[in-house]
Amino acid sequence: MTEPAGTTTGTLSFGPFTVTLHERLVMRDGVALPLGAKAFDTLLALMSRPNQVVSKYDLMALVWPGMTVEDANLRFHVAALRKALGDGKDGARYITTLSGRGYCFVAPISQVNIPADRRTVARTELPPVKLPNRLQRMVGRDEAVAAVSDRLIRSRFVTIVGPGGVGKTAVAVAIAHDLLATFSDAAHFVDLAALSDPDLVITSILLMLGLPAQTDDPLPALLAHLRDKRMLLILDNCEHVIAAAAPLAAEIFHAAPNIYILATSREALRVEGEQVYRLAPLAVPPDHPGLTAAAAQTYPALQLFLERATAGGAQIALDDANAAIVAGICRKLDGMALAIELAAGRVEAYGLEQTAALLDERLNLLWQGQRTAPPRQKTLQATLAWSYGLLSDIERLVLRRLAVFAGHFTIDAALEIVPDERVDRSRLFDAIDGLVAKSMVAARPIGAMMRYRLLDTTRAYLLEIEPDDAALAARHATYYRQWLEQAGTTWATVPSADERAIHFSALHNVRAALDWCFGTDGDASIGIALAAAAAPIFLAMSLLVECRRWSERALLALDPSSRGGAEEMHIQAALGLTLMFTRGGSEAARAALSRSLAIAEARGDAPNQLQLLGRMHIFHERMGQFDAALGYAQQSLTVAGTLGDAASLALAHSLLGVSLHLAGEHRDALTMLETAWHGPGTERISTVYGFDHRNRAGISLAREFWLQGRPADAMQLARQTVVEAAQMDHPITLCIALIWAVSIDLWSGDLDAAEENIDRFIAHAESRSMEPYLAVGRGVKGELAIRRGNAAEGVETIGTCLRELHDAGYELLTTTFNIALVQGLMTLGQIERSARLLDDAIRLVEQSGDHLYMPELLRMKGRVLLARAQPEADQAEAHFVQSLALSRRKGAKAWELRAAIDLAGLLAERGRREEAKRWLQLAYEGFAQGSETADIKAAEKLLQTL
């Protein structure tokens, strides 16, 4: 309570007692009663509501505003008050107790005036109640405090709005402390949270100001008192008494031009003069595999978690690994300050990983917070129950049904799923409006569409109080199956990650629906159709393991009578592709892809047949069966011709161009790849096929530029394709671009660029569990070690890598690793082993069809022949000439130059310098102007010596 402002001399009387309000005295026959401060406040609160029952909760809120106290405190002071008044003696009755309801002041009250010269009795002064203490350090709210303070000074009336537990009160208290000097310490905090009766709002303000509240209409007296005052009035927790608090705040704002009002509420007061500031949850670190501890620590949610966990006794040495765990916890809790504090308090007992695991299993709504917290904030459940209890019946019903949505949803989705005979469309609109206004549903635009979502904590609370509704879950799953089927056709034209985010915002709902469909009480038939429709979105996001899991579950649930249909075709296609990328060239992957293609052919489904030919093409390519892959590419061109559209032809040109490139048919490959990169329809060769075929054509074209004597163009195009792949936010596409870009770096001799690109490649392969790619990454690291002089380590690494790739059925890069292994073995002096390995590699190329590398293998064979203890110069020369001639015939200018360098060196040693110069000059002159690689520099140096 505060001292009365001004010089009010009004005195109340009842029975033989007089109550002098401004002096806080109760006298009998001119003698002051020995009342304590809280006993006096209790009397004043009861007298302000004569002949009305005041509940113990309301009474405690009036006597101990902003504090949590036990019932025993109130009983003690009521007993002391009764004893001092002699209540019950000689028939005197002043205060009655109504069991289970509260207390009531029953004596008649009148108002008298006492001359000032009689008010000299000694009394105990009550010190003014100060503002609640501000937090020692408030994390992440400096901007909000500054913004609200500025708006408050300019407009005089601001309401901080946000969901329970977001930190509204903490921000309001901080603002009040910051502005104390501005208002000459005249700042008054009124906590309305504990009031259950809206009529007590004005009583709380009157008592806080030390004013009498005995009249039936105390508002005029309050306004008269405030009219010439300058102060800051903080009305905290208005939501549950908003019907009284809102008009009262408006009256004060208009009647008292120097009163500044700062309110907090879970919904806006919606009165004239109010400025609304929506307090957002604390910013959380993104769900990004490359998140570092340093980056994570810049986010307020994580800062708060660490501070509260440390304060609770936990010892956390933040590193990149556990930063990802903390970031996940903060995201799970939506950046809500109260939820983060409660979870952080568990770390000392459970540790970080177990705390995160408990949250993943089920948000623990009953974890206890600080003992001094208000009851509504001691647990998440209490906070949510408080908010839920303030809703209307229809709002509660709609909110419970909205809990079927996981993540964002649109109003269209809600209109299709929520209504039934109890909730029509118009009532649904009204309810969602109310829920958004009351901070129970969050709304934000994604693209041009407004999206809504429930916070995870709110959803967890609702799922606990509402039993499963099978009909609602079935409508939800059916809606997202239909939505995926309709939206899936547009993904091929969505090139960027930002644009795809609009489609992918439904992914959490798709997962939730699949969980229900394949659960105990779900509908597997809906689940099968949903899994088939969802496969493209999982592939477009490179969510390979997840796509594989749902595809396998759907196939297990597939009824034999339903086999051979479109759903099985899509599911088998998705399963085959995901198995290929996560487990390599397994027989299971081949069987799934073959089955899917057979269904497409039997159905006469040319568009899906083309898509599946593309998957069969890359499957056999990765298996090292290059001739078979070429056959599928040629077949795809035939099918695309029957379809006749530009996108289908562009896809076929991409497949055929890549196969011709690997077959060493460079001139034809260049034509096909340039058409796939620049031609019509290329913008629509989307990740719906598992990866972006245009980008794959582009990086293959960059390799062709390098091989055909245009290294500068090659490196520029390689950089472009990597940048574009990164912008797609599609790890498979980016991995393909990066690994082929690495080959150009290695060919050019730029080892630093190769290392940077392979590190990125490994990081993205890890993020999507692409095991064969991880082995590839380690193999490239081995090649780099050999190039940098650590041949022993490099040879061992590549050997291990090749064994892993053989086990995984991944042979796409076997020849390139064999060439690197030969170089390492030669450096170590293991010449005969090098010779045997080269012979095996040449036979393998002849069998499988990756003739691209044959000139290099022939050249390396020549070098091995020269390195023997008894050099075989004639045989070496023959191999160099054979390599050079093959390179020239196929158009591989870069391989030709390498063979010419080795041949010229040998001829010069054998005294045939002019012949050496002619061979080398002819190979060198064919390169584009401005070309500069390690091979060109070596050729120039050799030409100078010749």
Image (cartoon, rainbow, N blue to C red):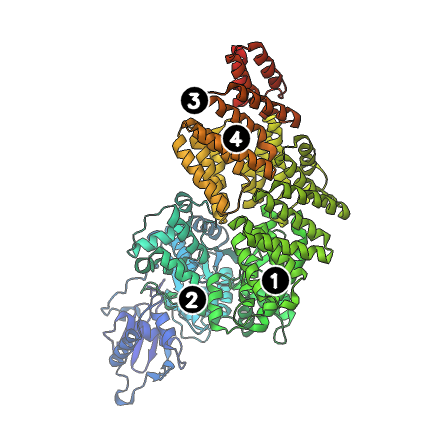
- Residue drawn at (37%, 68%), measured in percent from left and top? 375
Q: Which mark is residue 190?
A: none
In front: mark 3 or mark 4? 3
- Provide residue 83's location: percent of width, then percent of height: 24, 81
- Residue drawn at (64%, 43%), measured in percent from left and top? 628
Identified by mark 4, the residue type is Asp
Identified by mark 3, the residue type is Ala
Q: Quadrant of the C terminus?
A: top right
In front: mark 2 or mark 4? 4
Q: Which residue is mark 3?
A: 869
807, above or below 389, in the image: above
- Mark 4 or mark 1: whose residue is earlier in sequence: 1
Q: Which residue is mark 4?
A: 745
- Provide residue 415's location: percent of width, then percent of height: 63, 66
Identified by mark 1, the residue type is Leu
Q: Which residue is mark 1?
A: 530
Q: Which residue is mark 2?
A: 383
The answer to the question of whether label 1 and label 2 lie on touching residues, with beta carbons closer than 8 A, is no
